[in-house]
Image (spheres, rainbow, N blue to C red):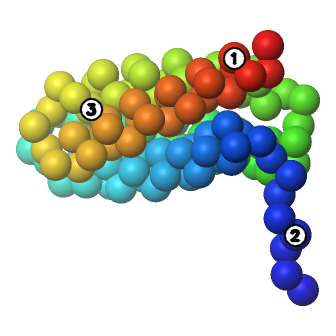
């Protein structure tokens, strides 16, 4: 049985896609940070938080939850904080993660504006 197309606005669909991409980037970044010589504990912790938040937000969007706007706000803030931390490091995985998180934060903010 095939899944039916989700009935989401273009803004919500973009946000959902960006959240899933952010989850992947954060999981990758956190895993790569474990192998770095420097203390990457803050980066790892923030990436893990963002991975969990964005996954949860994507799930809420997929079911058109009325709580999605609140999660969008939490995701945007966490993405911005994590992107700032990742951008402090010269590792490729951190740089890629920061770029992905900036896009995710922006799409979450757009979704919040649309819900308002």
Report crowding for label 1: few under 14, some 14 to 19, many 20 or more residues within 10 A (C-alpha): few
- Horizontal and vertical percent for residue 71? 71, 27
Choose mark 2 or mark 3, whichever is in front.
Answer: 2
Separation (CA) of disc 1 from disc 3:
26 Å
Q: Relative to 49, is 14 on the left or the right? A: right
Identified at 47% across, 45% down, the residue is: 22
> Label 1's element?
helix
> Label 3's element?
helix
Q: Relative to 62, is 18 on the left or the right? A: left
Identified at 56% across, 32% down, the residue is: 107
Q: How many marks are shown on the rendered structure?
A: 3
Is residue 27 in view from this perspective? yes
The quarter of the displayed image where residue 76 is located: top right
Identified at 62% across, 24% down, the residue is: 110
Is residue 75 in view from this perspective? no
Query: Considering the image in quadrants, where does the C terminus appear?
Result: top right
The residue where tag 1 is placed is: 113
The answer to whether residue 102 is above or below residue 112 is below
Labelled disc at residue 4: 2
Q: Residue furthest bottom?
A: 1
- Horizontal and vertical percent for residue 56? 70, 43
- Horizontal and vertical percent for residue 109? 59, 21
The residue where tag 3 is placed is: 86
């Amino acid at each position: 049985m095939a899944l039916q197309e989700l009935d989401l606005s273009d803004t919500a669909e973009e946000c959902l896609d960006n959240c899933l991409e952010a989850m992947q980037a954060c999981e990758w970044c956190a895993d790569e940070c474990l192998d770095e010589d420097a203390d990457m504990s803050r980066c790892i912790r923030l990436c893990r938080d963002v991975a969990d938040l964005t996954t949860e937000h994507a799930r809420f969007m997929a079911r058109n939850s009325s709580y999605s706007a609140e999660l969008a706000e939490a995701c945007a803030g966490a993405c911005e904080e994590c992107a700032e931390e990742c951008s402090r490091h010269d590792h490729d995985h951190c740089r890629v993660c920061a770029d992905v998180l900036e896009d995710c934060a922006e799409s979450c903010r757009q979704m919040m504006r649309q819900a308002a």
